[in-house]
Amino acid sequence: MAVHRFPPFEFDPATLQLWKNGHPVKLQRKPALVLAALLENHGEPLARPEICARLWPAGTFVDFELSLNVAVKKLRDSLDDSADQPQFIQTIAGQGYRFIGRCDSLFLAQPSVIEPPLPPLISAAPRRFRFGSAAILALVPVFVASAFMATSKPPVSYRAANFRQITHSGTEKTPFATDGERIYFFELRGDQTSLTQTSVNGGDELRLPASASVLPYQADVRGDQMVYLDGNWSEYFQANIGAQVWIRHLPAGAAWQVPGVRCQSVSWTSEGQLLCTLGGRFEIVDIQGKLIKQLFSVKHLAFRAHLSPDQKRVRFDMSDDSSMRNGWGVWDASINATDLHRLVPKVGNSCCGNWSNDGMLYVFEVWNGTRWDLWALPQSSWFARNPQAIQLTSGPLDARYPRFSADGSQVYFMGADFRGELSAVDEKTGELVPYLTGDSITQVDFSPDRKWITYVAYPEGTLWRSRPDGTERLQLTKAPLLAYSPRFSRDARQIFFSDIAGKSESYSVSIDGGELKFLFKATAECVSPRDAHIDVPFLTWCPAGTDKDEIRLIDPAAGTSQSIPDSGGMQNAVLSPDGQAIAGIREHSGKLRIFRLNSQRWTEMPIPITDNPGVLAWSPQRDAVYLQQERAILRCWIKSKRTEVVLRLPRCPSSLWWSNRISVSPEGKLLLTRQTGAGDVYAFDLQRH
């Protein structure tokens, strides 16, 4: 594998890692891809359209010229290079760019080492012998000695080696599964969803048309059949609705729906039946929809449930509370739930695990505060009662959705570069253009005097503040806290925000940095104004009877908590900039509702009915409300009750995996952060040592 050296820098195009004098240099994915393309064509001019084709897949909706300029500028900044006096990146007027620095390519080969063969990862079937009592007694000392030797040895550990890329399309591939010979995944290219399959060794891909509403949570393959979920998001997360269950014959057969069955998780049993969870209930059903057996129930919704190879245990993902915001983890239980427990409680948020076929190893994801890494947990045994989890990957990509090869010697996963680009809507061209510096940030708020901005870095989740031109940046929080919805105080000296990675606690921090000040914790009870310690009003949802809630306007400065009438069932609600009106929307209502505090009355205006209620934002002049509904962003004029389309988004992953929020700048520009990262299937060898 080639590593390019151009002193004082070295660059690995396989990992997109840049070093300077042996020290890593931070370089985002898009600038790194530009560098890889230029080094590949060292000394030759590379046209701008060709570079753009490498950075953005077909169907991407973006101002390519401006976005490429931003990427090249970031690359030059990382290389300490200049457009006027270039050492590395030269601009070819009217054409593109050329790498002009001296560059040597080093080809690194793995040393040939003869190692003793590793013991097989798949247990062989035991032979049966007959012993007399004397023979058994004679073997007791041998057994005791063997047990002592086994317990005296250090525990077996694992490491990931020989990473390689299997696919190269750069699109998110989820859910995906494997039958040991081929890898199957759903992906979106342009406006088309397809079921794609490729060899586990990579190569040509076969794409078949698929439903546009496949849910990216779970797919499972048994023999020549794949089972997966299909439906809309709002129903999927409702306890008693879930999603449809579909089965598809592989490699290219038709798909058909399992009748009368809806699940939030589905996977195969060893007998060809289905393990289905819905509303926290675990059941076994057959492929005709007939209930075979009820297993057990848990207190919250369960996702990605799957049985162990011996069918005696079940593992699944579950949050610590019903809001599904806090404490995600992999849970483990016997099939009668007599020993339900969190699998590895000390590693933080975890999910998305899978067993090896012999059940001796379990691999899963762990969130480290900035990315997802893969960990492995050996099976407990008589010799190792409490095995320790082992970290397998440590970036630079997020490692997601691990799957074992048939023999357990390899692990496949989706390597994802979760990046975003803060963009503004150009209403004249209908395109998204980078806003401010175009960095990977979201959740932007402007200070009342417009001298400062605060934002959340994506995907790290750290809170920052800076001047609107990007200068005077200061990081205010660090992992594992995941900042959300920051807002300036009235005097612009404090920033209030929530932490959605932990226990839904709210904090304040000075714009000069320093200690975080705890404000309050989101609980089943409503927040009291005297406990809020905030000088700006905000909305919160409070219980209002059995299975009901209502919106309340909390104004700590005035010491009031006002119940908003007829606000039950609101999916989204936002307070106007002057604090005198509330915009809200109910699911499947087809109406945008505006509540005026002075009249205490709601008014309504028609909007399209979609599966997703949408995300709301007020205009600075308070005369319109912006609404993002799936692929369209609408502007709803309050006085005339007229709705117009501001922007139509392509059918591609445009929203972020934990942040889905639009905002409006003081000058009235509509802002959103679009997903720009890439995802491909990778593999590594699993080695014992």
Image: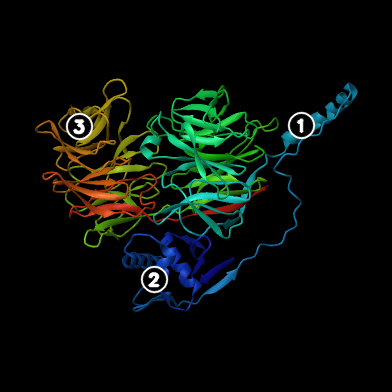
Q: Determine the CA span between mark 3 and mark 2.
A: 51 Å
Q: Is residue 445 visible?
A: no
Circle 3/circle 2 CB separation < 8 Å: no
Q: In this view, does 438 lie above or below 615?
A: below
Residue at image point 76% right, 36% down: 125
Left or right: 157 as drawn, with respect to 165 = right
Element type where label 2 sits in the image: helix
Picture coordinates of residue 130 (x, y %)? 86, 27
Left or right: 239 as drawn, with respect to 330 = left
Left or right: 625 as drawn, with respect to 358 = left
Q: Is residue 377 above or below residue 687?
A: above
Residue hosting label 3: 553
User: Which disc, if any, is residue 105?
Assistant: none
Residue hosting label 1: 147
Circle 1: residue type: Ala
What crowding class fits label 1: few (fewer than 14 Cα within 10 Å), some (14-19), or many (20 or more)?
Answer: few
Circle 3: residue type: Leu
Residue hosting label 2: 49
Element type where label 1 sits in the image: helix
Pick the residue in front: 636 or 259. Answer: 259
